[in-house]
Image (cartoon, coloured by chain):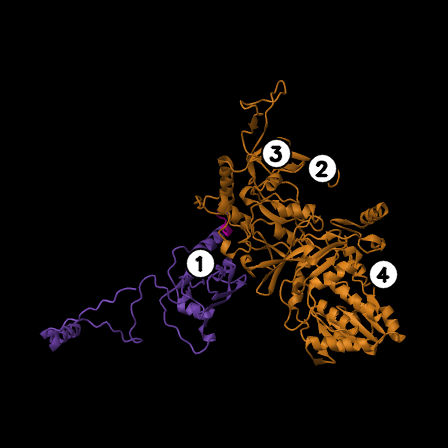
Chain colours: A orange, B purple
Amino acid sequence: MSEKGQTDKVTVNIDGKDVDVPTGITMIEAAEIAGKEVPHYCYHPKLSISGNCRMCLVEMGMPMRDRATGEPVMDDDGKQKIGWMPKPAIACNSKVSPGLHIKTDTDLVKDCRNGIMEFLLVNHPLDCPICDQAGECRLQEFATDYGRGFSRFIEEKNVKPKRTVLGPRVILDDERCILCSRCIRFMDEVADDPVLGFTERGSYSTLTCFPGKNLDSNYSLNTVDICPVGALTSRDFRFKMRVWFLKSVKSICTESSAGANTEVWQREGKIYRITPRRNDAVNDTWMTDSGRALYKQVEAENRLVQPKVNGGSASATEAVSAASKILKESDKIAVVASTHSSVEEQHFLSKLVRGKKAKVHAVAHLGEEDGLLLSADRTPNTRGAFITGLISELPSADLSALGSQIDAGEVDTVLAVHEDLAAVGLSDEQIDKVKLIQIATVSTPSAEKAAVLIPSLTVFERSGSFVNQQFRLQKFHAVVPGPAGLLSDLQVFASLAALTAGGVSESVRLKDAWDSLSSEIEELQGLQFRTIPDEGLAVPPGNFANIPFPEKKSLKFDSREFVREAMGVSEAS
Amino acid sequence: MAETKVIERKPLSLSERTYLPQIVSGLKTTISHMFKPSVTLQYPEERPPIPKGYRGVPTLVKDPNGREKCVSCQLCEFVCPPRAIRITPGEIPEGSESEHVEKGPEEFEINMLRCIYCGLCQEVCPEEAIFLQDVFSLSGYSREELVNKKDKLYELGGTLPDSHFKWDKKKAAEEAALAGGHH
């Protein structure tokens, strides 16, 4: 590749068709561009090449040249002859070159795959009925596609440990392992925590943790994802549900501002697991283990489901109108905004803030950065709050500023969104002094004191978009329906904004939010929710790039480089 | 328009007018049945013989060693056209008799109000654990009663002969490996 965005192309011939592919890629990637599947186990686009599974054998040939003169050798038709290699080559470890010829579906190639499958299945247990990988198992798929369909092996199969605990989240079934070494390479190259390795030789080969080491990295579950068979299994998902029942929805990880793209798998309104979704600009094909556990908040024990007004039960619409009354009567309002809210929600909340000239506070949730996919800002949408104009400076460490405003009598009403006020620096007396409108998903002591309590939906129950640390606008979709009778935050904020302005509450949809967003926010001009691509869209950061955000470096993000680039663009334009 | 054709009705003959031949032929049938073996069954005291391959109520079976054969792979739940089957999979804890099987159903429900007796569950089962046997009469006072739970399914199914003993062989291989045989 030369310049960014300017890729050199070479022409290769795949199964008789000329295809233009970028230089420097491997045959297996070229075949994928040509729409031909080359089966593989050990090859992974984001890991180094190992070449040990031998499943991707193809026939390969180059245009012939005379050895003595270097002149092209022509056949009778005046075309350059192709010199086919006498034996097949692995497609994952050979780079394309001009004029390269590949055959992926000849008898020889099929024979190779058949042979490889037979060798792999020699010691593979017939575990499919109890194996969690069944249904998304490459071995299963390729056995039906390329295998012989019956076994000629009459000797005894290997016996290996069936449930080796490798770490707090991963269990290894040694019999199923086909020794592709993807997990070893992942832990070494991506997670930078090389704890896995093979011991023993031949059919005794076993995947193990090094002595005294444990597979306890926060990225350990990625090894389960990339395991082409069911050898590495997630302890959380183990034996819970067969994958063919699960439907996946595209979502965004809310753990931090890295904004890893995810797929959330549900069946009949119950979420079973979260897996990463490939996005080369954000998270490649990885995500954190801690982000995968976030679905548990949907069924959290202290989940709020009953709206309350002054401690008594009410319907959600009653609670909203009670809240709007409180907001209407006061002109000393403070809003504790959340950077967990989506762009759309923040937009309507900032309308409410502007209408009532309320003071806005936000609390930062910071943590240690791991340099990969866990960034310092542990909320997904701080950038969105800036873009929508909800906040104009970075969230503060705690709410002491709000506390002193309350003490000074400058604030008598607080609208708290997704924040536990007691936990972020307000004393009980301060909370008691104000009329509190609390929007939250889980119950907390301070939420119980609220004059109006509006339970809200988790990220898995609503749709919207976040702006991650790279100023990348990414959308997420509702996976499961929320608890009956609850309103989305979007609806709550829209209703409150309309009601306090003296209007009537109308039902809003994401499209309404985006009609308003695209016309009012400069950065989002001309955008609609449905036109945001699944892999997200970079939003021009403009002057926001100057803000000293806490993130330093992640897998695909470097704050210095980002600022330099943003500045360069703004100077140039 | 078709033409209307009037057919003349023939007058009855003498024997027809007496009705006697008809009565005699009727009595012949009646009397001949008095000497034939009876075909009426005193149901429910008497039950009809059930032919081989009959598809009765689906049941779960155990192998001759008393191990439950179902490993909760949920293929029957997947294939069931009226969605009558519901399985809650579970892990067999370490230290139990059949820990080498690793997985078994925590709960297994077949809703007999939904079941259409198609036999696809039996056909798809990779462990030969579910069979439509000869129970054909089913009644209950409530809907709940007609949802067969795991206990009821095993009670109905009983034990069937096994020709594979797949998991017993697996256990034997593991024990042999421990004792220093083939690894």
Q: Secondary structure at mark 1?
A: loop
Q: Nearer the viewer, residue A469 or A149?
A: A469
Q: CA distance from mark 1 to mark 4?
A: 62 Å
Q: CA distance from mark 3 to mark 1?
A: 47 Å
- Circle 4 packing at 10 Å, graded few (<14), some (14-19), many (20+), is some
- Residue under label 2, please give it: A1
- Residue under label 1, please give it: B125
Would you say residue B78 is visible in this rendering? yes
Amino acid tagged 1: Cys
| Magenta span: chief secondary structure | loop
Of all chains, the one bearing label 2 is A
Q: CA distance from mark 3 to mark 2?
A: 17 Å
Of all chains, the one bearing label 3 is A
Of all chains, the one bearing label 4 is A
Q: CA distance from mark 3 to mark 4?
A: 54 Å
Q: Nearer the viewer, residue B87 or B166?
A: B87
Which of labels 2 and 1 is toward the front?
A: 2
Magenta stretch: includes residue B178: yes
Picture quadrant where residue A419 is located: bottom right
- Residue under label 3, please give it: A12
Residue at 66%, 71% in the rendered image:
A301
Is there one chain holding both mark 2 and mark 1? no
Query: What range is drawn magenta here?
Result: B177-182
Q: Secondary structure at mark 3?
A: strand
Of all chains, the one bearing label 1 is B
